[in-house]
Amino acid sequence: MKGKAVLQTFVDEMDEIYARTDAVIGNVNFGISPPLTYELTRKWNKDKSYLESADATEIPFSFEQTTRAVSLMILAPSYNEELEDPENTAIRTYLLNFSRELGNSATLVVYNAVKRYVESNRAVFVWRTLAEGQGEFDGLHTVETAWFVVRPLTDEPKMILESYTRLVPVGFGRPSDNDPRGNRFIKILAKADEADVNDMKQMLGKLLLDEARAER
């Protein structure tokens, strides 16, 4: 029941977060990655209240192709039978287990919701995630808000994919000698980010390659 309530809350917040897209994205300096790659580099903001990342990559495909590929990457897989707008909304719950790499209890339960908003020449994907620590990390969690924006880069068929994320830690703060449990939890989060980046890179490359083949 808790997970369902969290996901419904996230879905209910989507329109308000989408309405803030221009205000948020307009004040961000994006780091540009090589074409068709995806990076996620988190840094603490000035007052150390959250971690943020701002990354962008060029995609040498049309708006329709790029939006379709990013939609498949971000919206699926999910379960969405009960959602009001299942074509543009996805929710999912899953377990990340890094016990083999990082030791016992290195697990997270993740609740994620995303919604797509397609404009005339821009697509915005709004993302909300709760990641809860398990076992010895019980009580530690993060709440993430993210914006993924696809828009034209030039007049030629070339897009830019911008991603901006804010990750708020709850129950722990920035790395500190006085908080070994929090430090270990940050390592789990870094491992989760690494897995996400690798998955996104592979999926984005495959989807866009499929798009190119379909046009031949």
Image (tube, rainbow, N blue to C red):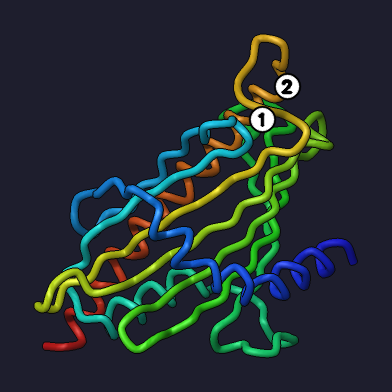
Q: Position of residue 199 (x, y in %)?
A: 42, 55
Three-letter code for the amino acid on which mark 1 is drawn:
Phe
Q: Along the horizontal axis of the image, is 115 left or right of 72?
A: right
Q: Are marks 1 and 2 in contact (CB under 8 Å)?
A: yes
Location of the C terminus by quadrant is bottom left
Image quarter for residue 163?
bottom left
Would you place residue 10 above or below residue 132 in this image? below
Which residue sits at x=29%, y=76%?
66
Q: Position of residue 137 (x, y in %)?
A: 78, 32
Which residue sits at x=34%, y=89%?
120
Within-10-Å neighbours for mark 2: few <14, some 14–19, many 20+: some
Which residue sits at x=55%, y=43%?
192
Q: Position of residue 108 (x, y in %)?
A: 70, 44
Q: Along the horizontal axis of the image, is 84 left or right of 187?
A: right
Would you place residue 49 above or below residue 212 in this image? above
Image quarter for residue 9?
bottom right
The one nearer the camera, 73 or 99, is: 73
Q: Along the horizontal axis of the image, is 192 left or right of 207?
A: right
Q: Which mark is residue 24?
A: none
The one nearer the camera, 211 or 100, is: 211
Image quarter for residue 182?
top right
Which element is circle 1 on?
Answer: helix
Q: Along the horizontal axis of the image, is 52 left or right of 122?
A: right
Would you place residue 65 above or below residue 158 in this image? below
Give the labeled residue for mark 2. Answer: 181
Give the labeled residue for mark 1. Answer: 185
Location of the N terminus by quadrant is bottom right
Three-letter code for the amino acid on which mark 2 is drawn:
Arg
Which residue sits at x=65%, y=62%?
112
The one nearer the camera, 115 or 109, is: 115
